[in-house]
Amino acid sequence: MQIYVILMVIMVVGGTIIDLIHKKSAQYFFENSKKAEKNAKRTVSSGEKMSLAVQTVASEVLTSSEFCNPQRRLSHLLTMYGFIIFVVSTATLIFAYPTEASAGIWPMLWHIGAAMLCIGGYWFWFIIRVDVSAEGKPWYKLAKADIFIVSLLTTATFGLLWSATQGGGLGWLFFALFIISSTSLFGTVLWSKFAHMFFKPAAAYQKKITKADGSQENLPDLGELSDPALQSRYPDIPEYMGTNPPNMGLGIKREAPQHY
């Protein structure tokens, strides 16, 4: 099992690197950063960059504040923290307690993490995903992008079933399905959204930097909305929206495209 875990880590690292090269994600971030530097209206200090990095971790990473839908946000947090607890406790049990019957609190954390993952994941798959206001996709309709969530859910589900049926033939069956699912989860990084969890914080941080240095918006500066000439040109823009609104009076906060 220790060898298996090491192989899965290698597959994740390798798949992420290949994904970076294939999709040219690193090149995109580098070129976008250089373009932003040319369009910057002010210089962001090192201290401010560090502050923005902390804000990114606290907001986009730890609390997933980019989700406007509270149900989607809670589902995501349950899945994310459940996955973290599940993976950390699995690695701890395999490497720190490989042969010991008593492993303290770690077996309980393993089950809690798997249960949180299942609750958040199945909530998304059977309730949020099928909602027309979210995606409106039937639960039985699968796409290549669904490899990650399906493998994640089956890994946690078969893991719990294996734990509940150990000692018999059914337990070995669920253990085999658990290994197959986890191998699919960590071995399909190049085709699934697994690597997305690494790119998302970087994109959020870059967005904060471009907003801070004034290079975020490519739209021309419209000016002050109280200007009569501007109001006559754009009569649908309400005055309360402030200077140079990014949404042109729709009342919707304009954000960069996100994959939820």
Image: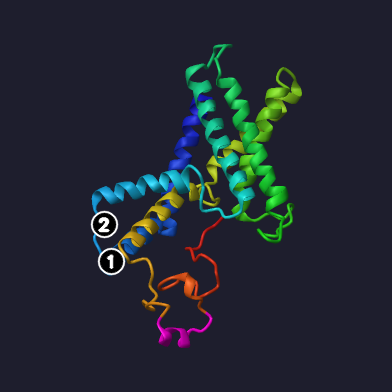
Q: Amino acid at mark 1?
A: Ala
- Which element type, helix, strand or loop, lies under badge 2? loop
* Residue under pointer 2: 44
Q: Are marks 2 and 1 in contact (CB under 8 Å)?
A: yes
Decide which of 252, 139 is in the foreground and name it: 252
Res. 244 in view: yes
Residue 157 counted in the magenta span:
no
In space, the residues marked 2 and 1 are separated at their CA atoms by: 9 Å
Residue at far top of view: 101
* Residue under pointer 1: 40
Residue 231 counted in the magenta span:
yes
Compared to residue 190, the image places residue 23 above or below, namely below
Q: Which residues are magenta?
A: 227-236
Q: Amino acid at mark 2?
A: Val
From the image, give the main secondary structure of the stretch colored magenta.
helix
Q: Is residue 133 left or right of residue 103?
A: right
Say which residue appears at 62% left-offset and 42% top-offset: 151
| Label of residue 235 in the image | none
